Amino acid sequence: MIAGAYAVPSVLIFVTCVVLILVGAVGVITVKNPVHAALSLILTLLGVAVAFVAQSADFLAAVQIIVYAGAIVVLFLFVIMFLGVDTRRHVEIEPLVGQRAFAAVGVVVTVGGLITLMAKSHWVSGALSVSNGGQPIATGQGNVQQLGTAVFTTYLFAFEATAALLIIAVVGAVLLARRERAVASEDVGS
Amino acid sequence: MTWVASVDPLFAHGVTWVVALIVAIKVLAGFSMLMGGVILMIWFERKAISDMQSRIGPQRWGPFGLLQTLADGLKLILKEDLVPAQADRFVFKLAPYLVLLPALVTFAIIPIGGTLTIAGHPVMLQVVNPPMGILVMLAMSGISVYGVMLAGWASGSKYPMLSSVRASAQMISYEAALGMTIVTIVLATGSLSLHNIVASQAGGVWHWNIIRLGVVPFVVFIIAITAELNRPPFDVVEAESELVGGFHTEYSSFRFAIFFLAEYMNTITMSAIIVTLFLGGPAGWIPNVSHLRFLFPIAWFLVKTVGFAFCYIWFRASLPRFRYDQLMDLGWKRLIPLSLGWMLIVAGFLVARGWGFIMAAAVVLAWTFLSRAFELGQSRESGPDSVLPVVGERPLPGARLRSMTNDEEEK
Protein backbone atom coordinates (compact mmCIF):
# COMPACT_ATOMS: atom_id res chain seq x y z
CA MET A 1 0.00 0.00 0.00
CA ILE A 2 2.78 2.38 0.96
CA ALA A 3 4.95 1.62 -2.05
CA GLY A 4 1.97 1.90 -4.34
CA ALA A 5 0.74 5.25 -3.12
CA TYR A 6 3.99 7.06 -2.41
CA ALA A 7 7.34 7.49 -4.11
CA VAL A 8 10.35 5.88 -2.45
CA PRO A 9 12.12 9.18 -1.56
CA SER A 10 9.16 10.56 0.35
CA VAL A 11 8.80 7.31 2.29
CA LEU A 12 12.51 7.45 3.15
CA ILE A 13 12.19 11.05 4.32
CA PHE A 14 9.13 10.16 6.36
CA VAL A 15 10.90 7.22 8.03
CA THR A 16 13.89 9.44 8.83
CA CYS A 17 11.61 12.04 10.45
CA VAL A 18 9.83 9.37 12.44
CA VAL A 19 13.10 7.95 13.74
CA LEU A 20 14.34 11.45 14.69
CA ILE A 21 11.08 12.36 16.40
CA LEU A 22 10.66 9.08 18.28
CA VAL A 23 14.27 8.74 19.40
CA GLY A 24 14.18 12.33 20.63
CA ALA A 25 10.83 11.93 22.35
CA VAL A 26 11.83 8.74 24.13
CA GLY A 27 15.12 10.37 25.06
CA VAL A 28 13.39 13.33 26.72
CA ILE A 29 11.63 11.12 29.25
CA THR A 30 14.24 8.39 29.77
CA VAL A 31 17.50 10.33 29.98
CA LYS A 32 18.52 11.23 33.56
CA ASN A 33 20.50 14.40 32.87
CA PRO A 34 18.20 17.42 32.20
CA VAL A 35 20.59 18.93 29.65
CA HIS A 36 20.62 15.69 27.68
CA ALA A 37 16.82 15.66 27.86
CA ALA A 38 16.74 19.17 26.39
CA LEU A 39 19.06 18.00 23.61
CA SER A 40 16.72 15.11 22.85
CA LEU A 41 13.88 17.62 22.65
CA ILE A 42 15.86 19.53 20.01
CA LEU A 43 16.22 16.28 18.05
CA THR A 44 12.45 15.84 18.11
CA LEU A 45 11.87 19.43 17.01
CA LEU A 46 14.32 19.03 14.14
CA GLY A 47 12.52 15.87 13.08
CA VAL A 48 9.21 17.74 13.08
CA ALA A 49 10.83 20.51 11.01
CA VAL A 50 12.01 17.98 8.43
CA ALA A 51 8.51 16.52 8.33
CA PHE A 52 7.13 20.01 7.67
CA VAL A 53 9.55 20.50 4.77
CA ALA A 54 8.50 17.14 3.33
CA GLN A 55 4.88 18.35 3.48
CA SER A 56 5.89 21.57 1.62
CA ALA A 57 5.30 23.65 4.74
CA ASP A 58 8.60 25.51 4.43
CA PHE A 59 7.64 28.51 6.48
CA LEU A 60 6.41 26.35 9.35
CA ALA A 61 9.65 24.36 9.21
CA ALA A 62 11.76 27.51 9.46
CA VAL A 63 9.61 28.93 12.26
CA GLN A 64 9.73 25.59 14.06
CA ILE A 65 13.51 25.81 14.21
CA ILE A 66 13.72 29.56 14.89
CA VAL A 67 11.11 29.65 17.64
CA TYR A 68 11.17 26.23 19.26
CA ALA A 69 14.74 25.06 18.74
CA GLY A 70 16.27 28.53 18.60
CA ALA A 71 14.50 30.25 21.47
CA ILE A 72 12.35 28.06 23.68
CA VAL A 73 14.77 25.19 24.28
CA VAL A 74 17.57 27.74 24.72
CA LEU A 75 15.42 29.20 27.48
CA PHE A 76 15.01 25.74 29.04
CA LEU A 77 18.76 25.22 28.94
CA PHE A 78 19.30 28.68 30.36
CA VAL A 79 17.09 27.87 33.35
CA ILE A 80 18.70 24.44 33.81
CA MET A 81 22.16 26.00 33.79
CA PHE A 82 21.29 28.89 36.06
CA LEU A 83 19.47 26.83 38.66
CA GLY A 84 22.08 24.10 38.51
CA VAL A 85 19.53 21.30 38.42
CA ASP A 86 21.86 19.28 36.24
CA THR A 87 23.03 17.23 39.21
CA ARG A 88 21.46 13.82 38.99
CA ARG A 89 18.77 13.52 41.59
CA HIS A 90 16.77 10.38 42.11
CA VAL A 91 13.19 11.36 42.70
CA GLU A 92 11.86 8.60 44.93
CA ILE A 93 8.89 10.50 46.29
CA GLU A 94 6.24 11.58 43.82
CA PRO A 95 5.92 15.37 43.79
CA LEU A 96 2.22 15.09 42.94
CA VAL A 97 0.05 12.48 44.59
CA GLY A 98 -1.23 9.91 42.12
CA GLN A 99 0.56 11.39 39.12
CA ARG A 100 1.48 7.96 37.80
CA ALA A 101 -2.15 6.88 37.63
CA PHE A 102 -3.12 10.11 35.89
CA ALA A 103 -0.23 9.70 33.46
CA ALA A 104 -1.33 6.15 32.64
CA VAL A 105 -4.89 7.32 31.94
CA GLY A 106 -3.54 10.18 29.83
CA VAL A 107 -1.37 7.84 27.78
CA VAL A 108 -4.26 5.42 27.15
CA VAL A 109 -6.60 8.22 26.08
CA THR A 110 -4.00 9.87 23.80
CA VAL A 111 -2.80 6.69 22.14
CA GLY A 112 -6.35 5.39 21.77
CA GLY A 113 -7.46 8.66 20.23
CA LEU A 114 -4.52 8.68 17.84
CA ILE A 115 -5.19 5.12 16.72
CA THR A 116 -8.88 5.83 16.09
CA LEU A 117 -7.97 9.00 14.24
CA MET A 118 -5.45 7.20 12.06
CA ALA A 119 -7.81 4.31 11.35
CA LYS A 120 -10.40 6.75 10.03
CA SER A 121 -8.19 9.23 8.25
CA HIS A 122 -5.43 9.87 5.77
CA TRP A 123 -2.43 8.15 7.31
CA VAL A 124 0.11 10.89 6.62
CA SER A 125 -1.75 14.15 7.03
CA GLY A 126 -4.18 12.97 9.73
CA ALA A 127 -6.99 14.86 8.03
CA LEU A 128 -10.41 13.21 8.39
CA SER A 129 -11.22 14.02 4.80
CA VAL A 130 -8.49 14.84 2.38
CA SER A 131 -10.10 17.70 0.54
CA ASN A 132 -7.82 17.70 -2.46
CA GLY A 133 -7.35 13.97 -2.87
CA GLY A 134 -3.97 14.07 -1.16
CA GLN A 135 -2.67 16.88 -3.38
CA PRO A 136 -1.37 20.05 -1.73
CA ILE A 137 -3.87 22.91 -1.77
CA ALA A 138 -1.73 25.15 -3.94
CA THR A 139 -2.77 28.31 -5.71
CA GLY A 140 0.57 28.75 -7.43
CA GLN A 141 1.69 31.51 -5.10
CA GLY A 142 3.97 29.51 -2.90
CA ASN A 143 3.48 28.43 0.62
CA VAL A 144 4.65 31.56 2.44
CA GLN A 145 2.39 33.94 0.52
CA GLN A 146 -0.61 31.67 1.03
CA LEU A 147 0.03 31.42 4.73
CA GLY A 148 0.55 35.16 5.05
CA THR A 149 -2.67 35.92 3.19
CA ALA A 150 -4.62 33.49 5.36
CA VAL A 151 -3.22 34.86 8.61
CA PHE A 152 -3.82 38.49 7.71
CA THR A 153 -7.29 38.10 6.21
CA THR A 154 -9.29 35.06 7.34
CA TYR A 155 -7.64 34.59 10.72
CA LEU A 156 -6.74 38.22 11.43
CA PHE A 157 -8.69 38.43 14.69
CA ALA A 158 -7.19 35.23 16.12
CA PHE A 159 -3.73 36.39 15.05
CA GLU A 160 -4.02 39.81 16.68
CA ALA A 161 -5.60 38.33 19.79
CA THR A 162 -2.67 35.93 20.14
CA ALA A 163 -0.23 38.81 19.74
CA ALA A 164 -2.00 40.81 22.45
CA LEU A 165 -2.07 37.76 24.72
CA LEU A 166 1.68 37.25 24.33
CA ILE A 167 2.40 40.92 25.09
CA ILE A 168 0.21 40.77 28.19
CA ALA A 169 2.00 37.61 29.31
CA VAL A 170 5.40 39.25 28.89
CA VAL A 171 4.35 42.41 30.76
CA GLY A 172 2.83 40.26 33.51
CA ALA A 173 5.99 38.19 33.84
CA VAL A 174 8.15 41.30 34.08
CA LEU A 175 5.82 42.82 36.71
CA LEU A 176 5.85 39.66 38.80
CA ALA A 177 9.60 39.20 38.57
CA ARG A 178 10.42 42.85 39.22
CA ARG A 179 10.93 43.61 42.88
CA GLU A 180 11.60 47.18 43.85
CA ARG A 181 14.12 47.75 46.56
CA ALA A 182 15.12 50.83 48.47
CA VAL A 183 17.78 52.83 46.69
CA ALA A 184 20.80 52.54 48.91
CA SER A 185 22.82 55.44 47.60
CA GLU A 186 23.69 56.87 51.05
CA ASP A 187 25.73 53.90 52.18
CA VAL A 188 27.98 54.04 49.15
CA GLY A 189 30.75 56.08 50.65
CA SER A 190 30.29 55.17 54.31
CA MET B 1 8.47 17.80 -4.77
CA THR B 2 6.84 20.33 -7.05
CA TRP B 3 7.96 23.25 -4.89
CA VAL B 4 11.60 22.45 -5.71
CA ALA B 5 11.03 23.14 -9.39
CA SER B 6 9.21 26.37 -8.59
CA VAL B 7 12.26 27.86 -6.84
CA ASP B 8 15.09 26.43 -8.92
CA PRO B 9 14.68 26.06 -12.72
CA LEU B 10 17.37 23.36 -12.66
CA PHE B 11 14.77 20.80 -11.53
CA ALA B 12 12.07 21.87 -13.97
CA HIS B 13 12.49 18.81 -16.17
CA GLY B 14 12.95 16.20 -13.49
CA VAL B 15 16.11 14.94 -11.87
CA THR B 16 18.47 13.30 -14.33
CA TRP B 17 22.05 12.26 -13.62
CA VAL B 18 23.31 15.48 -15.25
CA VAL B 19 21.25 17.52 -12.81
CA ALA B 20 22.52 15.42 -9.90
CA LEU B 21 26.09 15.98 -11.10
CA ILE B 22 25.55 19.74 -11.36
CA VAL B 23 24.13 19.82 -7.82
CA ALA B 24 27.11 17.81 -6.53
CA ILE B 25 29.53 20.20 -8.26
CA LYS B 26 27.70 23.20 -6.81
CA VAL B 27 27.89 21.75 -3.30
CA LEU B 28 31.60 20.98 -3.67
CA ALA B 29 32.32 24.39 -5.16
CA GLY B 30 30.47 26.15 -2.34
CA PHE B 31 32.28 24.10 0.28
CA SER B 32 35.74 24.62 -1.18
CA MET B 33 35.04 28.32 -1.68
CA LEU B 34 34.18 28.68 1.98
CA MET B 35 37.19 26.64 3.13
CA GLY B 36 39.58 28.53 0.88
CA GLY B 37 37.94 31.74 2.03
CA VAL B 38 38.55 30.85 5.68
CA ILE B 39 42.25 30.24 5.07
CA LEU B 40 42.59 33.57 3.25
CA MET B 41 40.41 35.36 5.80
CA ILE B 42 42.56 34.28 8.76
CA TRP B 43 45.69 35.35 6.88
CA PHE B 44 44.04 38.64 5.85
CA GLU B 45 42.93 39.39 9.39
CA ARG B 46 46.36 38.72 10.84
CA LYS B 47 48.09 40.77 8.15
CA ALA B 48 45.66 43.69 8.34
CA ILE B 49 45.78 43.85 12.14
CA SER B 50 49.56 43.67 12.02
CA ASP B 51 49.61 46.61 9.64
CA MET B 52 47.32 48.62 11.89
CA GLN B 53 49.53 47.85 14.87
CA SER B 54 52.82 48.50 13.02
CA ARG B 55 53.86 44.86 13.05
CA ILE B 56 54.78 42.57 10.18
CA GLY B 57 52.54 39.61 10.91
CA PRO B 58 52.88 36.13 9.42
CA GLN B 59 55.66 35.98 6.84
CA ARG B 60 57.47 32.65 7.10
CA TRP B 61 55.32 30.17 5.21
CA GLY B 62 54.58 30.75 1.58
CA PRO B 63 54.60 34.08 -0.24
CA PHE B 64 53.58 36.88 2.19
CA GLY B 65 52.96 34.22 4.84
CA LEU B 66 49.91 32.91 2.97
CA LEU B 67 50.44 29.32 4.14
CA GLN B 68 50.70 30.27 7.81
CA THR B 69 47.07 29.22 8.43
CA LEU B 70 47.71 25.76 6.98
CA ALA B 71 50.77 25.36 9.16
CA ASP B 72 48.79 26.44 12.23
CA GLY B 73 45.96 24.07 11.36
CA LEU B 74 48.37 21.18 10.96
CA LYS B 75 49.97 22.00 14.29
CA LEU B 76 46.55 22.12 16.01
CA ILE B 77 45.54 18.73 14.61
CA LEU B 78 48.75 17.12 15.85
CA LYS B 79 48.25 18.47 19.39
CA GLU B 80 47.02 16.27 22.22
CA ASP B 81 43.26 16.06 22.43
CA LEU B 82 42.14 16.76 25.99
CA VAL B 83 38.77 16.17 27.63
CA PRO B 84 38.51 17.61 31.16
CA ALA B 85 37.67 15.15 33.94
CA GLN B 86 34.62 17.23 34.95
CA ALA B 87 33.34 17.42 31.39
CA ASP B 88 30.16 15.88 30.07
CA ARG B 89 31.97 13.82 27.46
CA PHE B 90 29.22 13.38 24.88
CA VAL B 91 28.08 17.01 24.82
CA PHE B 92 31.69 18.20 24.99
CA LYS B 93 32.46 16.32 21.79
CA LEU B 94 29.18 17.26 20.11
CA ALA B 95 29.38 21.03 20.66
CA PRO B 96 32.04 21.94 18.03
CA TYR B 97 29.98 20.30 15.30
CA LEU B 98 26.89 22.22 16.39
CA VAL B 99 28.86 25.40 15.68
CA LEU B 100 30.37 24.16 12.42
CA LEU B 101 27.19 22.86 10.80
CA PRO B 102 25.17 26.13 10.81
CA ALA B 103 28.23 27.97 9.50
CA LEU B 104 28.37 25.61 6.53
CA VAL B 105 24.64 25.56 5.86
CA THR B 106 24.17 29.33 5.90
CA PHE B 107 26.69 29.86 3.13
CA ALA B 108 24.74 27.51 0.88
CA ILE B 109 21.82 29.92 0.49
CA ILE B 110 23.85 32.90 -0.74
CA PRO B 111 23.64 33.75 -4.43
CA ILE B 112 27.13 34.54 -5.70
CA GLY B 113 26.37 35.20 -9.34
CA GLY B 114 23.79 35.16 -12.10
CA THR B 115 22.31 32.15 -13.89
CA LEU B 116 24.46 30.08 -16.21
CA THR B 117 23.45 27.55 -18.84
CA ILE B 118 25.41 24.31 -18.58
CA ALA B 119 24.53 21.40 -20.90
CA GLY B 120 21.13 22.90 -21.57
CA HIS B 121 20.30 23.29 -17.90
CA PRO B 122 19.87 26.70 -16.27
CA VAL B 123 22.19 26.74 -13.26
CA MET B 124 21.83 29.35 -10.55
CA LEU B 125 25.15 30.24 -8.94
CA GLN B 126 23.72 29.50 -5.53
CA VAL B 127 23.99 26.11 -3.86
CA VAL B 128 20.31 26.05 -2.90
CA ASN B 129 17.48 28.55 -3.18
CA PRO B 130 15.00 27.40 -0.53
CA PRO B 131 11.58 29.09 -0.52
CA MET B 132 12.06 30.08 3.13
CA GLY B 133 15.27 31.80 2.03
CA ILE B 134 16.55 34.21 4.60
CA LEU B 135 14.73 32.39 7.41
CA VAL B 136 17.30 29.61 7.01
CA MET B 137 19.92 32.08 8.16
CA LEU B 138 17.91 32.97 11.27
CA ALA B 139 17.26 29.29 12.00
CA MET B 140 20.93 28.46 11.65
CA SER B 141 22.02 31.30 13.92
CA GLY B 142 19.51 29.89 16.39
CA ILE B 143 21.19 26.49 16.18
CA SER B 144 24.69 27.89 16.51
CA VAL B 145 23.72 29.31 19.93
CA TYR B 146 23.63 25.71 21.14
CA GLY B 147 27.19 25.03 20.07
CA VAL B 148 28.55 27.92 22.14
CA MET B 149 26.19 27.33 25.04
CA LEU B 150 26.76 23.58 25.32
CA ALA B 151 30.51 23.92 24.79
CA GLY B 152 30.67 26.17 27.84
CA TRP B 153 28.39 24.02 29.93
CA ALA B 154 29.95 20.70 29.01
CA SER B 155 33.47 21.88 29.86
CA GLY B 156 32.52 21.56 33.53
CA SER B 157 34.51 24.64 34.40
CA LYS B 158 33.69 28.07 35.77
CA TYR B 159 34.74 30.55 33.09
CA PRO B 160 33.44 28.63 30.08
CA MET B 161 30.11 28.33 31.93
CA LEU B 162 29.92 32.10 32.50
CA SER B 163 30.82 32.62 28.87
CA SER B 164 28.10 30.30 27.65
CA VAL B 165 25.45 32.09 29.74
CA ARG B 166 26.64 35.39 28.28
CA ALA B 167 26.69 33.96 24.78
CA SER B 168 23.15 32.66 24.85
CA ALA B 169 21.74 35.86 26.34
CA GLN B 170 23.62 38.03 23.86
CA MET B 171 22.79 36.04 20.76
CA ILE B 172 19.09 35.80 21.60
CA SER B 173 18.86 39.53 22.38
CA TYR B 174 20.41 40.60 19.12
CA GLU B 175 18.46 38.06 17.10
CA ALA B 176 15.35 40.17 17.76
CA ALA B 177 16.83 43.30 16.18
CA LEU B 178 18.24 41.18 13.37
CA GLY B 179 14.82 39.68 12.69
CA MET B 180 13.16 43.11 12.60
CA THR B 181 15.57 44.45 9.98
CA ILE B 182 15.10 41.31 7.91
CA VAL B 183 11.34 41.86 8.11
CA THR B 184 11.90 45.36 6.72
CA ILE B 185 13.78 43.91 3.75
CA VAL B 186 11.19 41.20 3.19
CA LEU B 187 8.44 43.85 3.25
CA ALA B 188 10.14 45.82 0.53
CA THR B 189 10.95 42.73 -1.55
CA GLY B 190 7.77 40.72 -1.11
CA SER B 191 9.71 37.46 -0.99
CA LEU B 192 11.82 35.50 1.44
CA SER B 193 14.01 33.89 -1.20
CA LEU B 194 17.48 35.39 -1.46
CA HIS B 195 17.38 35.06 -5.23
CA ASN B 196 14.35 37.36 -5.37
CA ILE B 197 15.84 39.74 -2.83
CA VAL B 198 18.87 40.14 -5.10
CA ALA B 199 16.70 40.38 -8.23
CA SER B 200 14.60 43.15 -6.67
CA GLN B 201 17.72 45.24 -6.17
CA ALA B 202 18.75 45.11 -9.81
CA GLY B 203 18.99 48.33 -11.79
CA GLY B 204 21.69 50.46 -10.24
CA VAL B 205 22.94 51.65 -6.91
CA TRP B 206 19.74 53.59 -6.14
CA HIS B 207 17.75 50.36 -6.00
CA TRP B 208 20.01 48.73 -3.45
CA ASN B 209 18.31 48.12 -0.12
CA ILE B 210 20.87 50.18 1.76
CA ILE B 211 19.57 53.32 0.03
CA ARG B 212 16.02 52.25 -0.80
CA LEU B 213 15.18 51.50 2.85
CA GLY B 214 17.12 54.38 4.32
CA VAL B 215 20.46 53.66 5.91
CA VAL B 216 19.03 52.83 9.37
CA PRO B 217 18.23 49.11 8.78
CA PHE B 218 21.71 48.64 7.35
CA VAL B 219 23.35 50.16 10.42
CA VAL B 220 21.15 48.15 12.80
CA PHE B 221 21.84 45.00 10.83
CA ILE B 222 25.60 45.41 10.79
CA ILE B 223 25.66 46.08 14.55
CA ALA B 224 23.35 43.17 15.32
CA ILE B 225 25.23 40.77 13.09
CA THR B 226 28.57 41.71 14.66
CA ALA B 227 27.03 40.91 18.04
CA GLU B 228 25.62 37.69 16.63
CA LEU B 229 29.10 36.71 15.45
CA ASN B 230 30.58 37.49 18.89
CA ARG B 231 33.23 39.50 17.15
CA PRO B 232 34.85 42.61 18.65
CA PRO B 233 33.56 44.99 19.96
CA PHE B 234 30.88 42.52 21.07
CA ASP B 235 33.20 39.69 22.07
CA VAL B 236 32.27 39.61 25.76
CA VAL B 237 31.74 35.89 25.20
CA GLU B 238 35.44 35.28 24.87
CA ALA B 239 36.76 38.34 26.66
CA GLU B 240 40.32 37.29 27.47
CA SER B 241 40.69 39.73 30.34
CA GLU B 242 37.56 38.46 32.09
CA LEU B 243 36.97 34.87 31.05
CA VAL B 244 40.36 33.42 30.09
CA GLY B 245 39.29 32.22 26.62
CA GLY B 246 35.54 32.02 26.99
CA PHE B 247 33.57 28.96 25.98
CA HIS B 248 36.49 27.23 24.28
CA THR B 249 38.95 27.54 27.15
CA GLU B 250 38.97 23.78 27.77
CA TYR B 251 39.12 22.80 24.12
CA SER B 252 42.31 21.74 22.45
CA SER B 253 43.54 20.19 19.24
CA PHE B 254 41.09 19.58 16.41
CA ARG B 255 37.98 20.59 18.36
CA PHE B 256 39.49 24.00 19.04
CA ALA B 257 40.36 24.23 15.36
CA ILE B 258 36.71 23.58 14.51
CA PHE B 259 35.56 26.47 16.70
CA PHE B 260 38.12 28.71 15.09
CA LEU B 261 37.14 27.56 11.60
CA ALA B 262 33.44 28.10 12.30
CA GLU B 263 34.05 31.61 13.63
CA TYR B 264 35.83 32.67 10.46
CA MET B 265 33.32 30.87 8.25
CA ASN B 266 30.59 32.84 9.98
CA THR B 267 32.46 36.09 9.45
CA ILE B 268 32.69 35.42 5.72
CA THR B 269 29.09 34.22 5.50
CA MET B 270 27.70 37.21 7.35
CA SER B 271 29.70 39.62 5.18
CA ALA B 272 28.15 37.84 2.20
CA ILE B 273 24.68 38.07 3.78
CA ILE B 274 25.06 41.83 4.29
CA VAL B 275 26.15 42.19 0.67
CA THR B 276 23.18 40.11 -0.49
CA LEU B 277 20.59 41.89 1.60
CA PHE B 278 21.72 45.49 1.30
CA LEU B 279 24.21 45.91 -1.53
CA GLY B 280 22.52 44.02 -4.33
CA GLY B 281 24.66 40.90 -4.01
CA PRO B 282 26.40 40.26 -7.32
CA ALA B 283 24.93 43.39 -8.93
CA GLY B 284 27.43 45.74 -10.51
CA TRP B 285 28.76 47.24 -13.69
CA ILE B 286 29.43 44.71 -16.46
CA PRO B 287 31.64 45.74 -19.40
CA ASN B 288 30.40 45.06 -22.89
CA VAL B 289 32.34 41.88 -23.68
CA SER B 290 31.07 38.86 -25.55
CA HIS B 291 32.54 36.08 -23.39
CA LEU B 292 32.91 35.34 -19.71
CA ARG B 293 30.27 37.88 -18.76
CA PHE B 294 29.21 35.65 -15.88
CA LEU B 295 32.55 36.26 -14.16
CA PHE B 296 31.84 39.93 -13.49
CA PRO B 297 28.92 39.46 -11.06
CA ILE B 298 31.02 36.94 -9.13
CA ALA B 299 33.89 39.41 -9.02
CA TRP B 300 31.58 42.19 -7.79
CA PHE B 301 30.22 39.89 -5.13
CA LEU B 302 33.71 38.94 -3.95
CA VAL B 303 34.89 42.56 -3.89
CA LYS B 304 31.92 43.65 -1.77
CA THR B 305 32.28 40.69 0.58
CA VAL B 306 35.98 41.31 1.09
CA GLY B 307 35.12 44.95 1.82
CA PHE B 308 32.85 43.91 4.68
CA ALA B 309 35.32 41.31 5.90
CA PHE B 310 37.83 44.14 6.12
CA CYS B 311 35.29 46.19 8.11
CA TYR B 312 35.14 43.43 10.74
CA ILE B 313 38.91 43.41 10.99
CA TRP B 314 38.87 47.18 11.28
CA PHE B 315 36.30 47.00 14.09
CA ARG B 316 38.50 44.53 15.90
CA ALA B 317 41.60 46.65 15.58
CA SER B 318 40.06 49.96 16.55
CA LEU B 319 37.11 49.53 18.92
CA PRO B 320 37.31 48.70 22.63
CA ARG B 321 35.14 45.90 23.96
CA PHE B 322 31.66 46.72 25.29
CA ARG B 323 30.89 46.16 28.93
CA TYR B 324 28.22 43.50 29.33
CA ASP B 325 25.48 45.85 30.60
CA GLN B 326 26.23 48.37 27.83
CA LEU B 327 25.85 45.58 25.33
CA MET B 328 22.44 44.60 26.71
CA ASP B 329 21.35 48.27 26.83
CA LEU B 330 22.32 48.76 23.21
CA GLY B 331 20.48 45.65 22.13
CA TRP B 332 17.24 46.03 24.04
CA LYS B 333 16.85 49.77 24.56
CA ARG B 334 18.26 51.12 21.30
CA LEU B 335 18.36 48.61 18.46
CA ILE B 336 15.07 46.77 19.01
CA PRO B 337 12.88 49.92 19.29
CA LEU B 338 14.80 51.54 16.42
CA SER B 339 14.41 48.60 14.05
CA LEU B 340 10.77 48.15 15.05
CA GLY B 341 10.00 51.83 14.46
CA TRP B 342 11.82 51.90 11.14
CA MET B 343 9.93 48.79 10.04
CA LEU B 344 6.64 50.58 10.74
CA ILE B 345 7.73 53.65 8.77
CA VAL B 346 8.85 51.55 5.79
CA ALA B 347 5.58 49.60 5.91
CA GLY B 348 3.64 52.88 5.95
CA PHE B 349 5.49 54.26 2.93
CA LEU B 350 4.92 51.00 1.07
CA VAL B 351 1.15 51.48 1.44
CA ALA B 352 1.02 55.18 0.63
CA ARG B 353 3.06 58.31 1.19
CA GLY B 354 0.49 59.70 3.65
CA TRP B 355 0.56 56.58 5.78
CA GLY B 356 4.32 56.78 5.80
CA PHE B 357 4.26 60.23 7.36
CA ILE B 358 1.56 59.18 9.84
CA MET B 359 3.71 56.21 10.86
CA ALA B 360 6.77 58.44 11.17
CA ALA B 361 4.87 60.76 13.48
CA ALA B 362 3.63 57.80 15.54
CA VAL B 363 7.16 56.44 15.83
CA VAL B 364 8.51 59.83 16.95
CA LEU B 365 5.75 60.01 19.57
CA ALA B 366 6.48 56.48 20.76
CA TRP B 367 10.18 57.27 20.89
CA THR B 368 9.50 60.27 23.16
CA PHE B 369 7.45 58.13 25.53
CA LEU B 370 10.10 55.43 25.50
CA SER B 371 12.97 57.77 26.24
CA ARG B 372 10.94 59.32 29.08
CA ALA B 373 10.33 55.81 30.42
CA PHE B 374 14.04 55.02 30.24
CA GLU B 375 14.76 58.27 32.06
CA LEU B 376 12.30 57.40 34.85
CA GLY B 377 13.58 53.85 35.10
CA GLN B 378 17.21 54.90 35.26
CA SER B 379 17.09 56.02 38.89
CA ARG B 380 15.12 53.00 40.06
CA GLU B 381 16.69 49.81 41.19
CA SER B 382 14.98 46.51 40.97
CA GLY B 383 15.66 42.88 41.57
CA PRO B 384 16.54 40.98 44.72
CA ASP B 385 19.07 42.44 47.14
CA SER B 386 21.69 39.90 46.17
CA VAL B 387 22.04 41.50 42.75
CA LEU B 388 24.89 44.00 42.62
CA PRO B 389 24.24 47.35 40.95
CA VAL B 390 25.60 47.87 37.46
CA VAL B 391 29.35 48.33 37.21
CA GLY B 392 29.20 51.96 36.15
CA GLU B 393 26.99 52.90 39.09
CA ARG B 394 28.79 51.24 41.95
CA PRO B 395 32.00 52.50 43.50
CA LEU B 396 35.09 50.91 42.11
CA PRO B 397 37.19 48.82 44.50
CA GLY B 398 39.77 51.60 44.71
CA ALA B 399 37.29 54.25 45.86
CA ARG B 400 35.80 51.84 48.35
CA LEU B 401 39.19 50.95 49.75
CA ARG B 402 40.10 54.60 50.06
CA SER B 403 36.92 55.40 51.98
CA MET B 404 37.58 52.47 54.31
CA THR B 405 41.15 53.53 55.04
CA ASN B 406 39.97 57.11 55.57
CA ASP B 407 37.57 55.81 58.19
CA GLU B 408 40.39 53.96 59.88
CA GLU B 409 42.44 57.13 60.06
CA GLU B 410 39.59 59.13 61.53
CA LYS B 411 39.30 56.63 64.34
Image (spheres, rainbow, N blue to C red):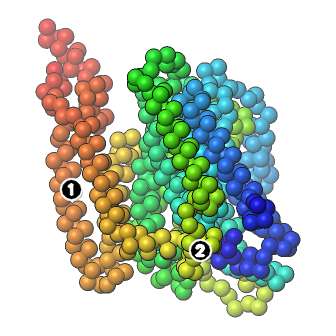
Verify CB contact (< 8 Å) between mark 1 and mark 2.
no
Q: Where residue B242 sits: x, y (%)?
A: 46, 32
Of residue B192 and residue A5, the one placed in the foreground of this image is A5
Q: Looking at the picture, do discs 1 and 2 lie on one chain?
A: no
**Residue B222 visible in rendering:** yes
Pointer 1: residues within 10 angstroms few (<14), some, or many (20+)?
A: few
Label 1 to label 2, Cα distance in Å? 54 Å
Quadrant for the C terminus of chain B, please: top left
Name the residue that disc number 2 marks. Answer: A132
Q: Where residue B101 sits: x, y (%)?
A: 66, 50
Kindly give the residue lying farthest to the right in the view shown.
B17
Amino acid type, residue under disc 1 in the picture:
Ser
Task: Kindly state the secondary structure of the residue where label 1 is placed.
Answer: helix
Q: Which chain carries label 2?
A: A
**Residue B59 visible in rendering:** no
Task: Kindly state the secondary structure of the residue where label 2 is placed.
Answer: loop
Q: Which mark is residue B371?
A: 1
Q: Residue at x 46, y 45 (%)?
A: A72
